[in-house]
Image (cartoon, helix red, strand yellow):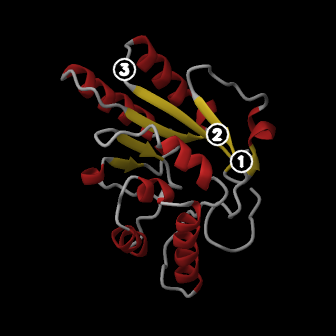
C-alpha cells in the first residue's frame, strides 16, 4: 500500500460523503501517510493494532480489504472500526483504546506469546490520565505494548499546546508530527471549538 493508495481511498470516501451517501460522521486522515507506512513496517502478522477514530489508513495498512472497509464506513462505523480477524480494533472514546491495549498485552504475556500490541493515539490523548496510567502499568509489568503518538497539534480542532500547556513526551513512546489536511470530522470547512 502506497501513500497514494491511502489518499485515493480517503478521496473516494470524501466524495461519497459529499454526495450524501454517508449520513454519518466520517473522520478522514491526510498528511500522515508516509509516517504510518513507516510505523507499520514494525507490525508483525500476529500483532494487534489499536487506534482511535481516525483509523481508515490503519485498517488498510493492516490488510482490511478496501471494499470491506468502505462498506463499514458507509454503514456508519467510521468512528469505531473493528476487524478482529485482521487484529485491528479502534475506539471513539478518547483514551478508551489504552486499557484494551493493556488487556491484550497481558493476555499475550500470560500465554508466552511473541506478538505485541501497537497502540496508536493522538497527541491530546497522550496528555490524558488514562494513557499515563496505562503506559506506566504496561511498562511496570513488562507488557508487549508499543505506544505511538500521532501528533497533528490538535485536540479536536484546538491547538493542543494552547489547550494543555507544555506537551509531555516519554522516551519509551514513539511520536511523529504531521499536518492534518482534513477537518476533524466531515469534509467541509475547519470548525474551531
Q: Earlier in the sequence, mark 3 or mark 1?
A: 3
Q: Residue at x 54, y 64 (%)?
A: 6
Cα separation, mark 2 vs mark 1, equals 7 Å
Element at label 3? loop
- Of badges 2 and 3, nearer the viewer stands 3
Residue located at (63% from left, 34% from top): 175
Q: Position of residue 97 (x, y in %)?
A: 43, 40
Give the residue number, with chain letter if any, for mark 2: 124
Residue 112 horizontal/vertical position (percent): 21, 21
Which residue is tagged 3? 143
Sort mark 2 into few (<14), some (14-19) or many (20+) by Cα contacts within 10 Å.
many
Whether the residues at callouts 2 and 1 have beta carbons within 8 Å, the answer is yes
Distance between mark 2 and mark 3 Cα atoms: 23 Å
Judge whether 180 appears above or below 131 on screen: below
User: Do tag 3 and tag 1 residues touch (Cβ < 8 Å)?
Assistant: no
List the residue tagged with mark 1.
154
Amino acid at each position: 500500500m502506497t501513500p497514494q493508495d491511502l489518499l485515493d481511498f480517503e478521496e473516494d470516501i470524501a466524495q461519497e460523503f459529499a454526495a450524501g451517501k454517508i449520513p454519518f460522521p466520517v473522520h478522514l486522515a491526510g498528511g500522515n501517510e508516509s509516517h504510518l507506512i513507516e510505523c507499520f513496517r514494525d507490525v508483525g502478522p500476529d500483532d494487534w493494532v489499536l487506534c482511535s477514530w481516525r483509523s481508515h489508513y490503519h485498517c488498510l495498512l493492516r490488510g482490511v480489504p478496501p471494499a470491506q472497509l468502505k462498506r463499514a464506513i458507509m454503514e456508519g462505523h467510521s468512528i469505531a472500526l473493528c476487524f478482529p480477524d485482521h487484529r485491528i480494533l479502534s475506539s471513539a472514546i478518547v483514551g478508551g483504546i489504552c486499557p484494551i491495549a493493556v488487556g491484550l498485552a497481558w493476555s499475550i504475556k500470560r500465554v508466552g506469546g511473541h506478538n505485541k500490541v501497537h497502540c496508536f493515539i493522538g497527541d491530546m490523548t497522550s496528555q490524558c490520565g488514562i494513557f499515563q496510567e496505562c503506559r506506566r502499568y504496561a511498562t511496570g509489568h513488562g507488557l508487549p505494548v508499543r505506544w505511538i503518538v500521532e501528533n497533528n497539534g490538535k485536540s479536536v480542532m484546538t491547538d493542543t499546546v494552547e489547550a494543555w500547556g507544555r506537551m509531555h513526551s516519554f522516551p519509551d513512546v514513539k511520536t511523529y508530527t504531521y499536518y492534518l489536511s482534513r477537518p476533524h470530522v466531515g469534509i467541509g470547512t475547519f470548525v474551531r471549538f
